[in-house]
Image: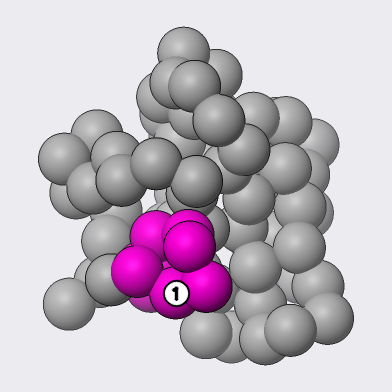
Amino acid sequence: MAFKGNYEYKIEIDTMEDAKKIVAIAGRLQGKIVLRSGSKFSVNAKSLLGVLLAKKLNWSDLKIVMEQDHYSEFEKFIAE
């Protein structure tokens, strides 16, 4: 779903392996990719520490926000 020129999808990170896979996928893609909760908190999805922080703090309504639409890359983690 496009939002303010970015693509934004609700995402679920259930395990440490999920976090590592998200970082690995984000790291090989072009453009800015962040995990965001609400409008105040966001972390770089290409940073393992950032993704682990998002998981550890158990942010509610966690979304992945991308400059380019990489839905198919993250489809496994996107909540419908």
When asked about the image quadrant of residue 38, the answer is: bottom right
Q: Position of residue 74 (x, y in %)?
A: 28, 43
So how many labels did they put on this image?
Answer: 1
Residue 73 versus residue 27 in the image, above or below? below
When asked about the image quadrant of residue 9, the answer is: bottom left
Using the rendered image of the protein, determine whether residue 76 is visible from the camera's viewpoint.
no
Q: Between 8 and 49, which is closer to the camera in this rendering? A: 8
Give the class, few, some or many, for how many residues have Cα within 10 Å of label 1's Cα (few <14, many ≥20).
Answer: few
At x 59% / y 85%, what residue is drawn? 60
Q: Between 32 and 10, which is closer to the camera in this rendering? A: 32
Q: Position of residue 55 (x, y in %)?
A: 64, 60
Q: Position of residue 70 (x, y in %)?
A: 29, 40
Residue 27 versus residue 33 in the image, above or below? above
Residue type marked 1? Phe
Residue 31 versus residue 79 in the image, above or below? above
- Residues in magenta? 2-11
Q: Is residue 60 left or right of residue 6?
A: right
Decide whether residue 27 is among the magenta residues: no
When asked about the image quadrant of residue 17, the answer is: top left
At x 49% / y 22%, what residue is drawn? 30
Magenta segment, principal secondary structure?
strand
Q: Is residue 80 left or right of residue 50?
A: left
Image quarter where the N terminus lies is bottom left
Dot 1 falls on a residue whose secondary structure is strand
Disc 1 marks which residue? 3
Residue 68 versus residue 65 in the image, above or below? above
